[in-house]
Amino acid sequence: MSGMLRSLWNYRHFVLSSIRNELISRFARSKLGGLWVIINPLSQVLIYALILSNVLAAKLPGIESQYAYAIYLMAGLLAWTLFSEIISRCLNLFIAQGNLMKKMSFPRITLPVIVIGSSLLNSILLFISILGIFILLGHQFSMAMIWLIPLTFVVVSLSMGVGLILGVMNVFLRDIGQAIPIVLQMLFWFTPIVYPATIIPEAYRHWLNLNPLYPLVDAYQQILVYGNNPQWEGVLTIAVIGFLLTVVSLFMFRRASAEMVDSL
Amino acid sequence: MSILTVSDLGKAYRSYRSEWQRFAGWFGLPIKPSEEHWVLKHVNFDINLGEAVGIVGQNGAGKSTLLKMITGTLQPTEGSVKVNGRIAAILELGMGFNPELTGRQNVFHAAGLMGFSAEQILQALPGIEAFAEIGEYFDEPVRTYSSGMQMRVAFAVATAYRPEILIVDEALSVGDSYFQHKSFSRIREFQEEGTTLLIVSHDRSAIQSLCDRAILLGNGTVIKDGNPEEVFDFYNAIIAEKESSTVEVKQLDNGKAQTSSGTGEAKVEEIALYNSKGEVAEIAEVGEQVELRIKVKVYEDIESLVLGYGIKDRLGQVMYGINTWHTEQVINAPQAGDEYLFKIAFPANFGVGSYSVQTALVDQGTHLTANYEWRDLALLFNVINISKTIFAGCLWNEPKILIEELEK
């Protein structure tokens, strides 16, 4: 493990320049450039808000604003976008970088770190634009927002743990790469992001506790929509699970490294 | 001092009955792979500081697998590779170049991929830009480059820092000849400063001019390790080898090894060099008219017979070579027992030094369709300079030099 950290430190320049290059090449030859990073999730917000706000807006208790539903959507999507981006990029990471891994010798651990770095950057850009929209809509935000920092770490560790395990396995078993987008889509709809948890009938609501994403998305919504502190028990459980998954994934990654290049 | 030690190196590709078994294996479960495919086995060699070693072998002999394990992209299945120092490889030039980024940005990135820090790269950047010589294009996106320009930038980055070991692939022969010369001289510079070279190529002259040792890989292991000339002779013999043919290595008096191979339908019985006085000679004077006489005996009825010969310098580079296919003197349908004497007259317009003659008895223009006999170092002779003006080089090409003093 310390070897991994040391080689990461030695290659810090490479990691940073990879993240920067990804951003630059997105700007290259595109008029809107980096704006596309936020246009995508925001247009999603717009679509849901247009189609579902009449149905669902009334179901959101506790906030007065007429834009309540849009605000709620943005909070949930901020968490979801980070989670799903890291997972889906980790999933195909080693296959996409196969050529490089076969031909150049460099610490492989830099690859997932680059993914996390650039996903975090995207998430921060999205967060800033959401804040801007909140100000435009006249939505208040509170000091509870500081909790977003540790929450982001929990989201990252959970998604990196899951993503890295799936990404390593996907090299050998390509079905995983096909199945996971479907699973992600289902997870999206089973998580209260576009709808409030309260619309699920009481009898079924306990199923939500099985969804590892629920406590995290809920925490984002509590903080951004209501200005409350998150409910810590749920978040802490996920933090522990995320940590364990990260450890397992790094262990697996190390064991698999040699065979991975053989199979690419 | 040994800089690279490869000991009992082996590489196997493993497959499992189910990929889940493979996954379980990572967590320590004792699971045997269903199939093991060995690409390399028991490879042993030791390379010293400053040596230049050529790696040769046919396609599929395991050259690239070996190099990948030396550079560290592939993990060995057994044995080990010990490297004392930094390795740079000119194998995959331009790997990881992003077409949307400028040359400068790509150089930055690629040097980062080699593990250098921002300060180190900034320091080397002017040198890289100057070496690549692509002018203003350096700040244009790489997608606008020609492949030659991309090569230049990639080579400049790969060799921006002198490594302890430099691996060079035959890909180097890409690019325009000006840059080829430039890159070769940089490689030689590195070599003079003590860098160990590892060169993979099929190009005999490239290896013989740069290397002082060659390693021949075949069937996943080292089959010959020695001086390049000897290894290449052996290698050629293997290429020419057909069913029922034999490879024979004879140690000559001067310590060199003579390799002959072939299917044996025809053989060189005698070979000798005659000087201008018509005597058998081992020494010829620069520019002297000499005659090479080769007696060939046919052992089985064959369709056609072609004699080829080449004169090589002491490094094994062919000075001149031709065969009777090109001179349109093919012998048609020789029968068992026939004997022929080839008298080949030419002026010994060579530089001072030792030369060898290689012969080939084949059916057509090359030794690839049928190879009756291939013999390296069939004859050795020396060229000395008695009466001519002193000159350098391996070709006697006497000029007329006129000097005119120009008016001031």
Image (cartoon, grey):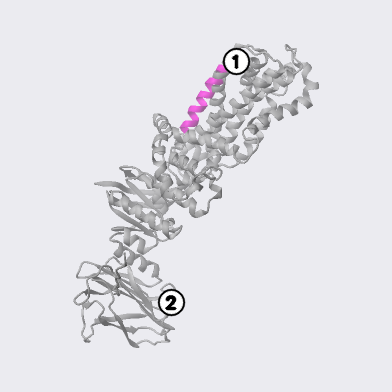
Position of residue B262 measured from the top left corner of the image (x, y, whole percent): 36, 74
Q: Is residue B387 above or below residue A176?
A: below
Q: Does the magenta run of residues contain A246?
A: yes
User: Residue at (23%, 75%) from the top-left corner?
Assistant: B381
Q: Please indicate whether residue B270 sits to the left or right of residue A237 in the image.
A: left
**Residue A74: in sight, yes or no?**
yes
Q: Is residue A205 magenta?
A: no
Three-letter amino acid code of the residue under disc 1: Met
Residue that mark 1 sits on: A145
At mark 1, the secondary structure is helix
Residue visible at 56% across and 43% down?
A: B100
Res. B11 in view: no
Residue type indicated by callout 2 = Gly
Q: Nearer the viewer, residue B395 or A208?
A: B395
Chain label for disc 1? A
Determine which of the numbered discs, if any, sits on residue B373 in the image.
none
| Magenta range | A229-251
